[in-house]
Image (cartoon, rainbow, N blue to C red):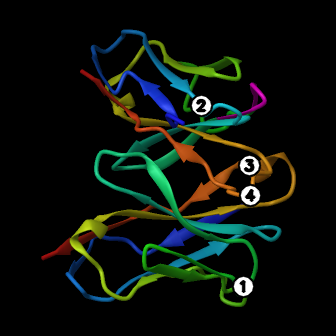
């Protein structure tokens, strides 16, 4: 079945440090890939996405590139801020059929940025 | 748009009681998802509706859980009888099929505590 594996947290960083969160996937078909972010006390919200190989999703200084050859979609940010403290979820969506509406999430990675 | 609306935001109940969680999806969205989030198990998809019809309920933990979507603007998740292990944050999300945004929009969640 489809699955997403992401690095376990928590990840603790100082402000302005470089952030990488690894994400790899297993999927039948050709999935779309997503990063969602959950701020404390809130629901998840889409951070960025990519729908085909070599696509780069970007938003709020975060980037991730769809790497089909390594089945990966690692999230990066060059200089984190305290406000980036959150839980980050990698997810995939298989395109074909009724199941295409369903997202498969990774376990989430908690990131704590200290001033 | 007000986004996905969930009620109540917090619910505290005693073991054995019936609990009903409510969700109003974003107008025009035709897919609706119920998730459960706990520290131990992470984010789990419980059930998914498309055009008010349950498509995948494989994540519903047991017969104590039931979900309905009587119309396009309302869904309920019921637990009867509730147990302490049901304590979690329950999220509802909605999505518009074939939209270019290609994302699920999450509500703020209902934090359920079963004593």
Q: What residue is disc 1 on?
A: A68
Q: What's the chain of the residue with tag 3?
A: A
Residue A2 picture location, percent across and down: 69, 62
Label 2 – label 3 distance at C-alpha = 15 Å
Looking at the rendered structure, the secondary structure element under dot 2 is: loop
Query: In this picture, is B32 found above or below B16?
Result: below
Tags 2 and 1 on a common chain = no
Q: What's the chain of the residue with tag 1?
A: A
**Principal SS element in the magenta part?**
strand
Question: Which numbered mark, 2 or 1, is in the foreground of this view?
Answer: 2
Nearer-the-camera pick, A104 or A75: A75
Q: What's the chain of the residue with tag 2?
A: B
* Res A101 label: 3
Q: What stretch is highlighted in magenta?
A: B48-54
Looking at the rendered structure, the secondary structure element under dot 4 is: loop
* Res B100 label: 4
In this view, which residue lies farthest toward the top? B17
Query: In this picture, is B19 found above or below B35?
Result: above
Q: What's the chain of the residue with tag 4?
A: B
Question: Which numbered mark, 2 or 4, is in the foreground of this view?
Answer: 4
N-term mark: 2 or 4: 2
Q: What residue is disc 2 on?
A: B25
Query: In this picture, is A45 found above or below B33?
Result: below
Q: Quadrant of the N terminus of chain A?
A: bottom right
């Amino acid at each position: 079945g489809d699955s997403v594996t992401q690095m376990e947290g928590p990840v603790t960083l100082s402000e302005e440090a470089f952030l990488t969160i690894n994400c790899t996937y297993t999927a039948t078909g050709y999935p779309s890939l997503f990063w969602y972010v959950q701020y404390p006390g809130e629901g998840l919200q889409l951070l960025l996405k990519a729908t085909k190989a070599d696509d780069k999703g970007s938003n709020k200084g975060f980037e991730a590139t769809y790497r089909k050859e390594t089945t990966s979609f690692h999230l990066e940010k060059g200089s984190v801020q305290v406000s980036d403290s959150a839980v980050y979820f990698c997810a995939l969506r298989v395109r074909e059929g009724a199941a295409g509406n369903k997202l498969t999430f990774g376990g989430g990675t908690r990131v704590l940025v200290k001033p | 748009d007000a986004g996905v609306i969930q009620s109540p935001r917090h619910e505290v109940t005693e073991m054995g009681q019936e609990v009903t969680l409510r969700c109003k999806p974003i107008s025009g969205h035709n897919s609706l998802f119920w998730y459960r989030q706990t520290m131990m198990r992470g984010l789990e998809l419980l059930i998914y509706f498309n055009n008010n019809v349950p498509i995948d309920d494989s994540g519903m933990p047991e017969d104590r859980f039931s979900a309905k979507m009587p119309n396009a603007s309302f869904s309920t998740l019921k637990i009867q009888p509730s147990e302490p292990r049901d304590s979690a944050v329950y999220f509802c999300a909605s999505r518009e099929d074939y939209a270019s945004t290609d994302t699920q929009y999450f509500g703020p969640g209902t934090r359920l505590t079963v004593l």
